[in-house]
Amino acid sequence: MIVSKGQKCDTGTAFIAPTFKFGDDFDFTDSDISNSQFQNFNVGNNKFKNCSLAGTEYLKCNINACDFAEADLTRATFKLSNFSKNTLAKETWISTSFVDMQFRDIFFKDTLDGCFFENCAFYGVTFQHAKLLNTFFINNKKFKRLKFIDCIADRNTWAFLKTNQADLAGVTLLS
């Protein structure tokens, strides 16, 4: 199936290459594609603004220069993928998991609640004005390169950051 601009995609859609194809600059703005699956895709310059991606899985994808502003990523799963140069602003990150991921040139600015980062590599990643609650960081690479600017974290998250030898100068412990 080939998706054209303006075509409606429904919740639970499986976007699996090569069966399902769409190119760069596809606009999912205001769509509900929750509980869908993106697999083996190069997802570039796509718009997911104000899009419901709750429960959606990204598996073996290159997600580059996409706009996720105000997207709902509750319970979304990103696995074995690259996530780079994406626009992030006012997303919902609740119980979102990132496993075996590579992040490049990303700014997390919002609340991450119950999120999970495992076996991830970070290059040029900054958490700025972020609130980190019950967010777990396990077996990550290039962790010392993470930047934290004016962030707050609860005790559990603080402990994971400290164990991973993060520079905590820009993180305040939530009381």
Image: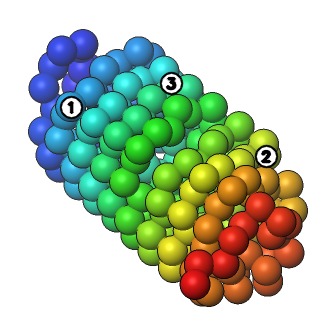
Quadrant of the rendered image containing residue 92? bottom left
- Which type of secondary structure does the marked residue at label 1 adopt? loop
Q: Which amino acid does label 2 sit on?
A: Tyr
Give the quadrant of the N terminus.
top left
Instruction: Kindly tell me whether residue 31 is visible in this rendering.
Output: yes
Q: How far apart are marks 2 and 1 (CA)?
A: 30 Å
Q: Identify the secondary structure beneath mark 2.
A: strand
Report the residue marked by disc 3: 44
Residue ID at (79%, 80%)? 162
Q: Which of 22 and 98 is in front in this view?
A: 98
Q: Is residue 141 visible?
A: no
Residue position marked by numbered label 2 in the rendering: 123
Which x, y percent locates residue 48? Answer: 35, 32
Q: 169 left or right of 61?
A: right
Q: Which of 90 and 105 is in front in this view?
A: 90
Is the residue 105 above or below the residue 97 in the image? above
Q: Which mark is residue 30?
A: 1
For the point 42% across and 36% down, which residue is it? 68
Return the x and y of residue 70 as percentages of the image width and height.
Answer: 35, 40
Q: Left or right of 105: which side holds 155?
A: left
Residue 76: name its quadrant: bottom left
Q: Residue at x 21, y 31 (%)?
A: 30
The residues bearing labels 2 and 3 have C-alpha atoms spaced at a distance of: 19 Å
Q: What residue type is labelled 3?
A: Gly
Q: Earlier in the sequence, mark 2 or mark 1?
A: 1
Residue at the outermost front position: 175
Residue 96 image position (x, y, % from top left): 43, 63
User: Nearer the N terminus, badge 3 or badge 1?
Assistant: 1
